[in-house]
Amino acid sequence: MIERIPFGATGHESTRTIFGGAALWTNDTARADRALDLLLEYDVNHIDTAAGYGESERMIGRWMGRYRDRFFLATKTGDRTAEGAREEFHRSLERLRVDHVDLLQMHCLIDPEEWETAMGPGGALEALIEAQEAGLARFLGVTGHGLTAPAVHRESLERHPFDSILVPYDAPLMQLPDYAASFEELYRLCQERNVAMQTIKAIARRLKEDENDDTHTTWYEPLTAQEDIDRAVFWVFARPGVFLNTAGDVDLLPRILDAASRYRLGTAPSDQEMAAWMTSRKMSPIFSPSDE
């Protein structure tokens, strides 16, 4: 059984593992159905996808006629203007085969100029608020990748009372002092305001050494051994109130869900154990200051 906790102030109790729809990028119905079987087996009740995730929305839309009531459904728009975001979101509703979503998010909003556009007059935020007022989206959120994401999310929460944020969080990243400090500030703010905190990249090991390596559908090299995934998942879950969005690889989904189902309070590794483990696995942050 995977623990369920309140998803911020939404009133929904979400499983602490949220299915990351990027795993369904291609038009592969067998792959999608395998993922659905696992979600049902582990009683995962929250799905996160995006307009920019290839065929993901269409693959998930195939499930909605039968299983809509079982899932808190979230999607994202990457357009920064109100007109563009409005059009993209309506296409998402069509692909998902639903009349509303539970959470509509602005996708990877970290670039300063894009942020000003999205949050300003005629920006995407206007379309999100419009969708919420029309009953097409129950709640609103913002997501981001990279080392600046925590700081930008704090600015976003000052501009609008978003219901959720999504941010990178893994052990190697938290060895970067500036990132760790920024993340902790965001975490405290989310706790104070009851904003749901979704985290990504839990099982990232390091950047791929070979750019042509297609062993996994993640853009980074993931952890793959069950014992390593256990350690990474348990480490994330040791922080109260955070959610873990699963990796963009269906083949890794069974191991992530298995780990999540076996987590119990007090089973997380110590800081010393984590440090030794990261060294032994040659782990390193997948984001660096030079990327920003």
Image: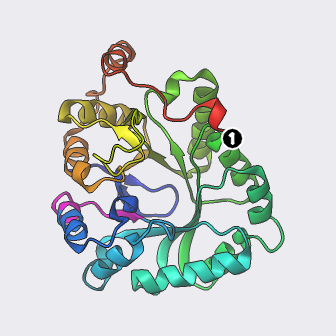
The amino acid pointed to by label 1 is Ala
Residue 198 x/y as whole percent: 47, 50
47 within the magenta span: yes
Residue 144 x/y as whole percent: 59, 50
Residue 2 x/y as whole percent: 24, 50
At 36% from the left edge and 38% from the top edge, which residue is drawn?
221
The foreground one among 195 and 98 is 98
Residue 127 x/y as whole percent: 68, 77
Q: How many marks?
A: 1
Q: Which residues are magenta?
A: 38-48
Dividing the picture into quadrants, the one containing residue 283 is: top left
Q: What residue did someone put label 1 on?
A: 151
At 37% from the left edge and 78% from the top edge, which residue is drawn?
58
226 is higher (above) or lower (below) than 28: above
| Colour scheme of the rendered structure | rainbow
Give the left or right position of residue 244, taking residue 133 as reference: left
143 within the magenta span: no
Q: Can residue 185 be spotted in the picture?
A: no
Give the left or right position of residue 83, taking residue 44 as reference: right
Name the secondary structure under disc 1.
helix
Dividing the picture into quadrants, the one containing residue 292 is: top right
Q: Badge 1: few (under 14), some or many (20 or more) residues near its Cα, within 10 Å?
A: some
Q: Can residue 174 be spotted in the picture?
A: yes
At 65% from the left edge and 32% from the top edge, which residue is drawn?
290
Give the left or right position of residue 89, taking residue 253 as reference: right
At 38% from the left edge and 45% from the top edge, which residue is drawn?
212
89 is higher (above) or lower (below) than 19: below
